[in-house]
Image (spheres, helix red, strand yellow):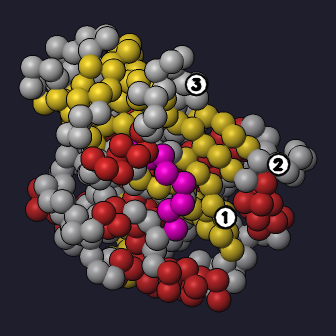
């Protein structure tokens, strides 16, 4: 796939700067398996899915991961906490991977000071502005973020949220993401209850959204892009719900591209074929989905409208079909849909002619 295929014209005023209220009142562009595009409202979702379907949500919680620190010279450094590393630094406390900006004058061993006087230490440069950061003994990264951090809104959003919860899903549980799994922002508790009454099942997976969300594809040939790996966790109970839905003929509806990546990784590992032992799964996914990919786990996709030149746009094109999605985006622009994190949503069924190549292998 050529990089220019991930471009599309978008007037700047269509980039959503605030969420709609209530959340489920956003617009929903529905691409059905057959027939023309439908323009709906997100709260109508229970009418568009089927009893027995299983919605799979990413319940990762966004950290207040953007923290301002200062060098001893007084220069400001913005730290974006990406993930806690599994091993502590001997005698130095927790180890975190952070993105530091500006990064070009930072050096290993340098101390950074927070507003309350706490000192952090840059240990090792990882590359692309990322550093291994030491949190001193007696402190924790989560506690420091709670005290000094702000929500890590994407650069195209120019206003701070009135309430940090605007950038959290209503079902967020496990802290660890540097960005929201935005397809889930449209759900309300009332809508989830209506889906329950409709007979739609739900399962929760956890994938902590990391650095790659912020990295555009730069390679002329999209497949040459190297995607960053992200950690995920799926409980045995969640696996059991997904497997039971599949066994009874229900569709697996991924809420967001992060859920897609977890589900497709589980399928690649043989976790969804009904033969593996049902147990908790802790892993890392580096799956990079581009057009031509054969989906093995996901039957329907709920997603937002994505940035040009992004890995998530490539994934969505792979699921919907390149030209089919481009036509849908063109219609969304013409009809003034709202784009990106706080924008409107899509519900995508694979085109009927593609059913043999999308869904269960």
Query: Which mark is first along the chain, 1 or 3?
Result: 3
Between 355 and 114, the one lying in front of the other is: 114
Mark carried by residue 276: none
* Residue 338 visible in image: no
Task: Tell me if residue 20 comes above or below residue 355 in the rendering.
Answer: below
Query: Which mark is first along the chain, 2 or 1?
Result: 1
Task: Tell me if residue 354 comes above or below residue 212 in the rendering.
Answer: below
Q: In the rendered image, which residue does mark 2 sit on?
A: 279
Relative to 226, 106 lies left or right: left
Relative to 263, 59 lies left or right: left
- For the point 76% across and 65% down, the residue is 241
Q: Secondary structure at mark 2?
A: loop
Q: Which segment is the magenta one? A: 171-178
- For disc 3, the neighbor class at 10 Å (few under 14, some 14 to 19, many from 20) is few
Residue 229 at what x, y percent from top left?
52, 31
- For the point 27% across and 51% down, the residue is 150
From the image, state whether disc 2 or disc 3 is nearer to you.
3
Query: Which mark is first along the chain, 3 or 2?
Result: 3
Instruction: Give the Cα separation between the discs numbered 2 and 3.
Output: 24 Å
Between 145 and 316, the one lying in front of the other is: 145
Mark carried by residue 87: 3
Residue 58 at what x, y percent from top left?
54, 57
Residue 164 at what x, y percent from top left?
30, 63
Instruction: Give the Cα separation between the discs numbered 3 and 1.
Output: 30 Å
The reply to whether the magenta stretch includes residue 174 is yes
- For disc 1, the neighbor class at 10 Å (few under 14, some 14 to 19, many from 20) is many
Task: Tell me if residue 34 comes above or below residue 272 in the rendering.
Answer: below
Instruction: Give the Cα separation between the discs numbered 1 and 2.
Output: 14 Å
Between 160 and 337, the one lying in front of the other is: 160
- For disc 2, the neighbor class at 10 Å (few under 14, some 14 to 19, many from 20) is some
User: In the picture, residue 86 is in which quadrant?
Assistant: top right
Q: In the rendered image, which residue does mark 1 sit on?
A: 203
């Amino acid at each position: 796939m050529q990089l220019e295929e991930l471009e599309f014209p978008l007037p700047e005023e269509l980039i959503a700067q605030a969420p709609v209220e209530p959340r489920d009142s956003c617009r929903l562009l529905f691409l059905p398996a057959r027939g023309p595009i439908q323009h709906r409202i997100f709260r109508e979702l229970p009418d568009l899915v089927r009893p027995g379907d299983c919605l799979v949500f990413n319940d990762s919680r966004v950290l207040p991961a953007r923290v301002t620190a200062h060098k001893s010279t007084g220069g400001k450094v913005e730290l974006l906490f990406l993930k806690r590393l599994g091993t502590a630094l001997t005698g130095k406390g927790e180890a975190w991977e952070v993105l530091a900006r500006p990064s070009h004058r930072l050096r290993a061993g340098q101390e950074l000071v927070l507003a309350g006087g706490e000192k952090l230490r840059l240990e090792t440069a990882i590359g692309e502005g990322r550093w291994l950061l030491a949190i001193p003994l007696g402190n924790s990264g989560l506690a420091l973020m709670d005290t000094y951090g702000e929500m890590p809104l994407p650069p195209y959003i120019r206003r701070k949220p009135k309430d940090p919860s605007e950038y959290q899903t209503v079902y967020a549980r496990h802290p660890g993401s540097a960005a929201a799994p935005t397809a889930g922002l449209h759900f309300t508790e009332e809508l989830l209850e209506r889906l329950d009454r409709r007979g739609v099942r739900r399962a929760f997976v956890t994938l902590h959204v990391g650095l790659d969300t912020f990295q555009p594809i730069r390679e002329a040939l999209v497949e040459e892009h190297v995607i960053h790996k992200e950690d995920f966790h799926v409980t045995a109970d969640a696996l059991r719900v997904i497997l039971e839905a599949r066994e009874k003929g229900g569709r697996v509806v991924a809420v967001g591209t992060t859920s897609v990546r977890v589900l497709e990784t589980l399928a690649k590992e043989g976790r969804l074929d009904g033969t593996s032992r049902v147990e908790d799964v802790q892993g890392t996914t580096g799956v990079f989905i581009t057009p031509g990919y054969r989906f093995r786990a996901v039957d329907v996709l709920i997603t937002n409208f994505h940035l040009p030149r992004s890995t998530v746009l490539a994934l969505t094109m792979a699921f919907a079909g390149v030209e089919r999605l481009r036509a849908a985006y063109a219609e969304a622009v013409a009809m003034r849909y709202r784009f990106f994190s706080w924008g409107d949503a899509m519900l995508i069924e694979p085109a009927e002619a593609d059913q043999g190549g999308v869904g269960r292998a």
